[in-house]
């Protein structure tokens, strides 16, 4: 991995999203408590927690709430404030259905329009992660809400020590439980060659960032890359559930008016440049042209 400037330019043609997704319960867990959503314009991974079946309920409620509200969204009224409200609704719904005894992390991205072009609106609660690869530049976009991340930021442990710390799985924010369910947001322009990875900590707990980069940078098909990351997790022991979404920005110049529409895994659909403008932002959003890699 290197810290060189992005090779991609701002999108000027028609943007298509090509993506793959997969989930596996791993080799140690009886149930898969992860849930995922891969349906334009939103892509998200939720990692449930709270004991037998409860985590599965929390992550499922979260994803269904987002999916129901976002289904068919191509209106000019949708904004970042709407996303913030949806996440708050998911938090409230989980608390209602589980009595605050189960929770879930949530990480992902929505494609929006900003300053006349498509942008990634990233969001995160907990320690599921979102990464971005462009050319030789690769790094984590989201910031973990976890005890070990706080220790790293305080300088008490190193990032390498955090990987094996006994409290590495303790999160400080979650939806549906606890006192802090606040999401973080980042807004970045879509650039040619962007590849986005969204995953639960079942991947990052078993495969290093270097290992993830090796797959993302050498396997061009997003579905095949997704499955390769799952396989790498299984080879490393897969002590937790693992869920992966790989999302590519594909630029068509000139635009193909017919598009390429496909549903489900490995789908690719046209992003209409007229939908999802971003007239305003939640008070906590960070507007960044390019967040440096971790």
Image (spheres, rainbow, N blue to C red):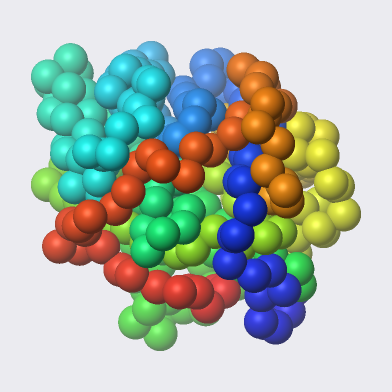
Left or right: 205 as drawn, with respect to 95:
right
Point out the image quarter for the C terminus.
bottom right
What's the residue at 29%, 57% (across, down)? 184
Work out whether 72 lies above or below 185.
above
Q: Position of residue 165 (x, y in %)?
A: 50, 62
Residue lying at 63% horizontally and 53% vertically, measured from the top left: 13
Q: Is residue 141 left or right of residue 12?
A: left
Disc tally is: 0
* Above or below for 24 versus 128: above
Task: Name the image quarter holding residue 24.
Answer: top right
Q: Is residue 145 visible?
A: no
Query: Residue 212, position in %: x, y?
Result: 73, 55
Position of 232 with respect to 107 (left or right) is: right
As drawn, 192 above or below 109: below
Residue located farthest toward the right when viewing the structure as drawn: 218
Q: Measuring 32% from the left and 58% from the top, which residue is drawn there?
A: 185
Q: Is residue 285 visible?
A: yes
Q: Say whether residue 222 is left or right of residue 47.
A: right
Where is residue 127? Give x, y as percent: 42, 51
């Amino acid at each position: 991995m290197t810290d060189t400037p992005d090779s991609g330019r701002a999108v000027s043609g028609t943007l298509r999203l090509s993506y793959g997704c997969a989930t596996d319960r791993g080799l140690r867990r009886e149930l898969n408590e992860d849930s995922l959503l891969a349906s334009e314009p939103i892509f998200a991974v939720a990692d449930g927690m709270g004991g037998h079946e409860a985590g599965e309920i929390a992550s499922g409620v979260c994803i269904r709430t987002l999916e129901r509200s976002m289904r068919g969204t191509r209106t000019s009224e949708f904004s970042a404030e709407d996303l913030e409200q949806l996440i708050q609704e998911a938090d409230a719904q989980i608390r209602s259905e589980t009595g605050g005894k189960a929770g879930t992390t949530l990480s992902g991205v929505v494609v929006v329009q900003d300053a006349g072009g498509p942008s990634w609106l990233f969001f995160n609660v907990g320690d599921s992660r979102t990464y971005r690869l462009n050319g030789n530049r690769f790094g984590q976009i989201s910031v973990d809400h976890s005890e070990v991340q706080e220790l790293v930021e305080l300088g008490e442990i190193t990032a390498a020590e955090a990987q094996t710390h006994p409290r590495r799985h303790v999160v400080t924010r979650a939806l549906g439980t606890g006192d802090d369910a606040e999401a973080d947001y980042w807004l970045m322009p879509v650039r040619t060659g962007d590849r986005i990875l969204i995953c639960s900590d079942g991947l990052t707990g078993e495969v290093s960032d270097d290992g993830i980069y090796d797959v993302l940078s050498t396997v061009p098909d997003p579905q095949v890359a997704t499955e390769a990351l799952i396989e790498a997790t299984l080879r490393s022991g897969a002590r937790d559930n693992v869920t992966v979404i790989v999302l590519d920005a594909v630029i068509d110049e000139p635009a193909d008016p017919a598009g390429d529409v496909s549903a489900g895994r490995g789908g690719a659909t046209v992003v209409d440049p007229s939908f999802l403008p971003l007239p305003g932002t939640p008070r906590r959003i960070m507007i960044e042209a390019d967040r440096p890699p971790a």
